[in-house]
Structure formats: C-alpha cells, structure tokens
Amino acid sequence: MSRSAFLALLTVGVVGTAAWLVFFSSVLGVRDIQVVGNLGVPAQQIQQATGVPEGRPLAVVDMAQVEERIMKIRQIESARVSRGWPGTLVVEVVEREPVAVVPVGTRSALMDRHGVMIEVKDIAPPSLPVLRVDHPQPGDPATGAALAVIKALPDDLAPRVAEVLAPSPETVSLRLKDGRAVVWGGRDRPRDKARILTTLLKRPADTYDVSSPDVVTVK
C-alpha cells in the first residue's frame, strides 16, 4: 500500500470515528438540560417538556421541535433552545406576565398582554385591573384594544385602575378604585390620552372623557 493510500484510509477512519462520536454515540450526548429565565414554572417541568432523553447525541436534537414542545406549557411566552457542548441542552424561556384579571364564575383568570389565559386563581391579585369584555381571548378586537390601553397606562396611573371595560374596540373605558370613570375611546393616541388624564385627575369630577384628546370634557 502506498503512503498516499494509507493516509487516505487513515483520514477516512478519523472522519468516520468523529462522525460516529458526534452523531451516533452517547459520548457527546445530552447529560444536562439547563433552564434559564423561569420564575414561576418549575425547571423540572420544562426539562420534561423537552422530550429529550439523557444520552441522545446533542448534534441530532431538533431544536425547533423541542421549542414547540416547551411552548405547549401555557405559562411560557417564548422559548429558545441551543447546544452547550459537550453535553448540555440550554433552554432559555420568557414566561407570560399577567396584566389583567378576567372573572370566570367565582374565580379569576390571569391574562397576559396577548390575551392568553395563563392560570385561574381563587383570589385575584389586587394590583391587576379587572378586564370586562364579551369575548376575552387572543384575536378578539375588543380584548386587544383593552389590553393596549392597559399597556399605555403610566406607572403612576395603572395602580389606580380597578376595571377596564371594552364593549367594542372603540369604546374602552376605565373605572378607578376611587369610583371615578374615564371614557378612553379607541386605542389611538395612547400617550396623549394618558398624559392628559393624569393632569385632569387633579380636578374633582365623576367622569373624565379623553376619547378625543383635542377636546376633553370633565363632568
């Protein structure tokens, strides 16, 4: 056998061994699943949701499929999965944060900014406003408008809101914890409305109409 042929066979052998180690053996298999970003969802629950058994070659793990499985956990808003060589599967998650409460019978469902019901509780957090719409769900125009208004509320105003009502996307209104009412209107010009409302609330009244920021009324 010539020297060049020997080197060629040696190269093939090395490449083949390396490929076997990476793609077929458990030498570079998953030994640990590291979860980052979770606060409310237990790491063990997320690890189980990946569906990746210990020892599976890290190189052949389908990241997109794993992310899809994790996203089936209702409390997870987004998930990103990556490889951490030599044997760690890294899962970075962002959990859904509740922004409103939706009455469900005698209980309360927590809703995130996308209109997704995260969980149902016996007692609602007093810091969150109650959302009153006909069809509280993702994609519902009235729900989307109400959530947009909640998002637009400045930090000093948001804690003062008890309820957000939206019979339609253009007729959103607020009820403050002190009983006063705010006619907000549609989701247009949220910064102007919030700024004007903050100033108007310094004046005693029962109702504040900022639905048209250029022509506001106080009753």
Image (cartoon, rainbow, N blue to C red):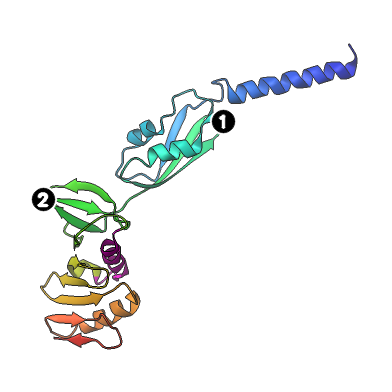
Q: Three-letter amino acid code at disc 2?
A: Gly
Position of residue 103 measured from the top left corner of the image (x, y, whole percent): 15, 55
- For disc 2, the marked residue is 105
> How many numbered markers are drawn?
2
Tag 1, which secondary structure?
helix
* Region in magenta: 140-157
Tag 2, which secondary structure?
loop
The answer to whether 140 is drawn above or below residue 214 in the figure is: above
Which one is in front, 116 or 90? 116
Does the segment drawn in magenta span residue 146?
Answer: yes
Q: Residues within 10 Å of mark 2 (few under 14, many from 20)?
A: few
Q: Is the stretch drawn in magenta largely helix, strand or loop?
A: helix
Q: Three-letter amino acid code at disc 1?
A: Ala
Q: Which corner quadrant of the image does residue 203 belong to? A: bottom left
The answer to whether 9 is drawn above or below residue 164 in the figure is: above
Can see residue 179?
A: yes
- The C terminus appears in which quarter of the rendering? bottom left
- For disc 1, the marked residue is 59
Position of residue 17 measured from the top left corner of the image (x, y, whole percent): 67, 19
Residue at x 10%, y 50% (from the top left corner): 105
